[in-house]
Amino acid sequence: MSVNITRKLIDEIDKDMQVALKGIEEKYGLSLSIGGYSFSPHNLTTKITGKVAEVNGKSIEQFEFENTCKVYNLKAEDYGKTFIANNKEYILVRVDIKKYKFPIIGKSVETGKLYKFPREVVNQLD
């Protein structure tokens, strides 16, 4: 069977991989994510990243936020608060201290995708 790798095929493969990873996450107590895909007609590459799902009863996302939030004068209680950017609502989920220009990471309420923002967006937290 001869197959050419296309964006459409990768979208289908990604859906299948997301389903497969859910079972692995539950079995091993991990949080797994698939990175972006690079591909040619005959080859594709991606990266799977895993983290422990919980630390001290908190999600790893919340635990990491609590350990980095003070850098931008945020409080642990700010985790999960909402803000508006570009007329869309986001949830504050991470502070990336390695990213100087866009250190605030928000999750789209609409799509669940992560986006990076300048630190000024924290002035609008609910």
Image: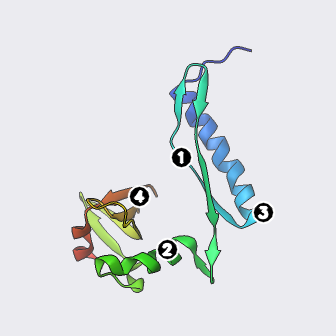
Residue type marked 4: Glu
Reply above or below: 101 against 83.
Answer: above
- Do the numbered discs 2 and 1 sit on residues whose CB atoms are within 8 Å? no
Q: Residue furthest right?
A: 27
Which label sits in the foreground, 1 or 3? 1
- Looking at marks 4 and 2 on the same chain, the residue that comes earlier in the sequence is marked by 2
- Do the numbered discs 4 and 1 sit on residues whose CB atoms are within 8 Å? no
Q: Quadrant of residue 55?
A: bottom right
Reply above or below: 100 against 92.
Answer: above
**Residue 80 visible, this angle:** no
Q: Which residue is mark 1?
A: 35
What is the secondary structure assignment of the residue under circle 3? Answer: helix
Residue type marked 1: Gly
Q: Residue furthest front?
A: 98
Front residue of this view, candidates 98 and 12: 98
Residue sitting at x 59%, y 44%:
47
- Looking at marks 2 and 3 on the same chain, the residue that comes earlier in the sequence is marked by 3
Q: Which residue is mark 2?
A: 64
Q: Residues within 10 Å of mark 2 (few under 14, many from 20)?
A: some
Q: Residues within 10 Å of mark 4 (few under 14, many from 20)?
A: few
Q: Which residue is mark 4?
A: 110
- Residue 9 appears at what percent x and percent y? 59, 29
- Looking at marks 4 and 1 on the same chain, the residue that comes earlier in the sequence is marked by 1
- Mark 2 and mark 3: Cα distance apart in space: 23 Å
Residue sitting at x 32%, y 64%:
103
- Residue 116 appears at what percent x and percent y? 34, 58
Q: Which residue is mark 3?
A: 27
- Residue 8 appears at what percent x and percent y? 54, 29
What is the secondary structure assignment of the residue under circle 2? Answer: helix
